[in-house]
Image: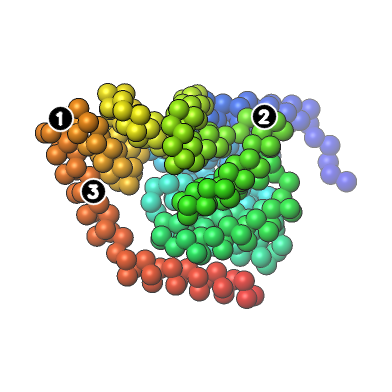
Amino acid sequence: MSAPQHPRTFNLRAEIDQTLAVAATLTHSQPTEALALANQAQQRARAISYREGEARAWLQAGRAAFAMPDCDEAHPACVAAAELAESIGDMTLWSEATHIAAEVRYGLGRYQQAEVHWLALLERGLVQGLALAQLFGYLGMAKLYFMLVAPGPTSAMLDKARRVLPQVDRLDVRFGLHINIAAHHYRCGEDAAAGIELAEAETLLPRLGFCEFEPELYYYRGYLFKRQGRLVEARQQFERSLSLNGSAHNHWGKVVNLVALGETCLAQGEPHAADHYLRRALDGAIQLGSPYLEAECYAALARACADVGYTHGEFAHWRAHFNLLEQLERRDNASDRADAVAQLGARIAALEAR
């Protein structure tokens, strides 16, 4: 039987738990405040040796920091959360912290570092039968294959993640996986399959309350409508997605929505509106440090300039676009990609063969 807790210690634990609950609600709207609360909770939990609370506080700090661009605290906080969670045997928290650590590195273009985390998840998931870790691991492999422009392996990894889904009771995880599968179908031109996945995700919303991935539902549905020529409906979806992202610190989501709105305005013959959205998108892409998004913005801005007869601007934007593409092609050599695809496949096969 464990020793009885001092009343003050018990009260501090309750205070820490409540502080973390408040921080969780502020993560996507007020991440700076959420981070401050999480750090406060972490220090108090450590002071009273409340290790479970400290692990959750580190994870909450990682989540809040991840919601802010250029915040260096996200990755070390997630690593600290994972290490502490492993030491106390909370493998669910370990899985979540390790996955967010991978997402942080992936978002910065540090794909090899992200791969280390996702391979660790896949290994633990397969060896120890941890469904959440296995799902995150396969989802991470799909993301890496996507960046390597390997649609076949991407599809295979998403299929394996889906097979694990019945063992995972987290509705937010289920929603996110449906969105990722829908995005892959859309990129492959499989619109009907993408629509089915989006509809499955949407059925989960009434039970989810807040869902950080909800804007992506309307974003991808907007692109489906746009490809079908349903521009008015597409624009409505993009506007809805942007409004949700506007109330959250989802900077990537805001940028891609602004690009989508700009492109849709161009298709509707509204180059001035397009220019407004695309200039905001370009500022955001530069802040995020994403050359892919910058190149996309410059191409769309060039078309907007062409539509209003602004030749000088059109030339300048196309030049910036092609300069970025040249840099990306030098960085992402096709032969290197083929080797990377083969090497990643070998690592996954080795884990699955154990």
Dot placed on the residue nearer the N-terminal end, 2 or 1 = 2
Label 3, label 1: how far apart the Cα atoms are: 22 Å
Label 2, label 1: how far apart the Cα atoms are: 47 Å
Residue 134 versus residue 269: which sits nearer the camera? Answer: 269
Judge the density around disc 2: few (<14), some (14-19), many (≥20) Cα neighbours within 10 Å. Answer: few
Give the residue type that dot 3 points to: Leu
Point 54% across, 60% down: residue: 155
The extreme front residue here reads 229
Name the secondary structure under disc 1. loop
Name the secondary structure under disc 2. loop
Mark 3, mark 1: which one is toward the viewer? 1
Q: Position of residue 100 (x, y in %)?
A: 54, 47
From this view, report whether residue 354 is shown above or below residue 9: below
> Which labelled disc corresponds to residue 324?
3
The extreme left residue here reads 312
Give the residue type that dot 2 points to: Gly
> Which labelled disc corresponds to residue 209?
2
Name the secondary structure under disc 3. helix
Q: Position of residue 194 (x, y in %)?
A: 56, 47
Dot placed on the residue nearer the N-terminal end, 3 or 1 = 1
Q: Left or right: where does residue 195 sit relative to residue 74?
A: right
> Which labelled disc corresponds to residue 310?
1
From this view, report whether residue 153 is shown above or below residue 28: below
Point 25% across, 39% down: residue: 298
Mark 2, mark 1: which one is toward the viewer? 1
